[in-house]
Structure formats: structure tokens, C-alpha cells
Amino acid sequence: MGCAISGLAAKAEFGERNTDAAASAVCPSGDQIQMIKESWKVIRDDIAKVGIIMFVRLFETHPECKDVFFLFRDVEDLERLRTSRELRAHGLRVMSFIEKSVARLDQLDRLEALALELGKSHYHYNAPPKYYSYVGAEFISAVQPILKEKWTAELEEAWKTMFQYVTGLMGQGYQEESRRQHLLTLSPKDRPEKSNTAL
């Protein structure tokens, strides 16, 4: 698949994406990968804290995201969310995915497979691609205080690039699964014919 994702457009603002437009999201450069990996060594020590902060902020800034989470849908008290075992567990799962993404930045085929599969599974959770980039923005807000003086404009751009790349792949996986599920609902006579490539 390489370093570009067709069918995705990154707009000027981080977190805004149109999955119907044709464009590309670029993977991080070698220097950006190195910066991400170095900063992850510090972030990793606080992953549970970052996971909770990230999701509480997500629900503060984008309350509509709670609709995707059955357990948190009706919770209005954000303080209750901060102490929720379920939110902590979900935050840790997301942080685990980020850790795996960071580890695979040098193996893009493995990173792409991981992100595509996660996007496909999010189709079944009813979690549309428009929400994915919100998580990246909240992650960045959550880790800035942890990294303190190590946080730079270049590091922020590196993380943004990684999240745009990964969430673009997730969106692609979501769309692939959506099309697959749509085809499964069609009667056999309405399904597109597979071309016979045998000689």
C-alpha cells in the first residue's frame, strides 16, 4: 500500500477529514518517526492516565461521541467518568493500539493491516470515521503536559501526521467493511459479478 492512502483528504485543520474525497494522507517521515518513538518512551509511563484524560476531554469537546459508547451514553457527570473502570479499560485498549502503531512505524505493511482491521471492527461498533481524528487531537492535548519542555511544534506535527495516517487507514477499513456488508444484504442476482480472470 505504501505511504499514501487514496480516497482520504486531510483538511487544513487537524481532525477534519472527508473520507469521500480523493486525496492522500502521508505517513510520517524518518525524522518524525524517530521523534514519535523517543516521546513515546516518556508517554508510555502514564498510559492509563493519558487514556482517561483523552476520553474525558473527548466527551467534553465532542459529547456526541458518547453515543458510540453504550456504557457512557447517559453519563453526564464527567467526574464519574474519570473514575470509571470501564473508561480506564477502554482508554488502555486505545493506548495499546497507539503503542502498536508506534512500534510498527518502521513496518508500514504491518501498521496498515492493523489500522485497516481496526477500522473494519469499528464499523460493527457503529463508530464512524468522523470520530477517529478527534481521539488524535485529544491524545495530543493529553500528552503535552507530560512531555513538558520536550514538546515542540515539530513533535506535535509528527504526532498529527501519524494520527492522520492511521485514522485515514481506519476510515478506509470502515468503508471497505461497509461496502462488504452492503453486498451481503443484496440478493445473489443483485450482487456485482466477479470477473473471470482465468485463462
Image (spheres, rainbow, N blue to C red):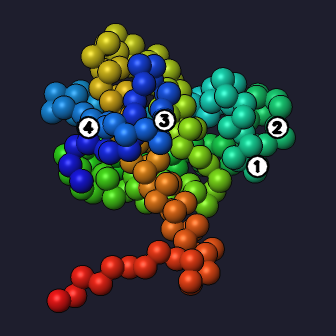
Q: Nearer the viewer, mark 1 or mark 3?
A: 3
Q: Is 36 placed above or below 70 here?
A: above
Q: Which residue is mark 4?
A: 27
Label 3 sits on a secondary structure element that is strand
Taking the image as shown, residue 151 lies to the left or right of residue 188, namely left
Specify whether residue 99 is in view. Answer: no
Question: Where is residue 50 shown, x and y percent of the image?
Answer: 52, 32
| Residue 71 disc label | 1
User: Tag 2 or tag 3, which sits nearer the N-term?
Assistant: 3
Instruction: For marks 4 and 1, give the CA distance.
Output: 34 Å
Q: Which residue is mark 2?
A: 75
At label 1, the amino acid type is Leu
At label 4, the amino acid type is Cys
Question: Where is residue 136 shown, x and y percent of the image?
Answer: 47, 32
Q: Quadrant of residue 3?
A: top left
Q: Nearer the viewer, mark 4 or mark 2?
A: 4
Instruction: For marks 3 and 4, give the CA distance.
Output: 18 Å
Taking the image as shown, residue 23 lies to the left or right of residue 141, namely left
The answer to which of 26 and 117 lies nearer the viewer is: 26
CB within 8 Å, label 2 to label 1:
yes
Label 3 Cα neighbours within 10 Å, binned few <14 / some 14-19 / many ≥20: some
CB within 8 Å, label 3 to label 2:
no
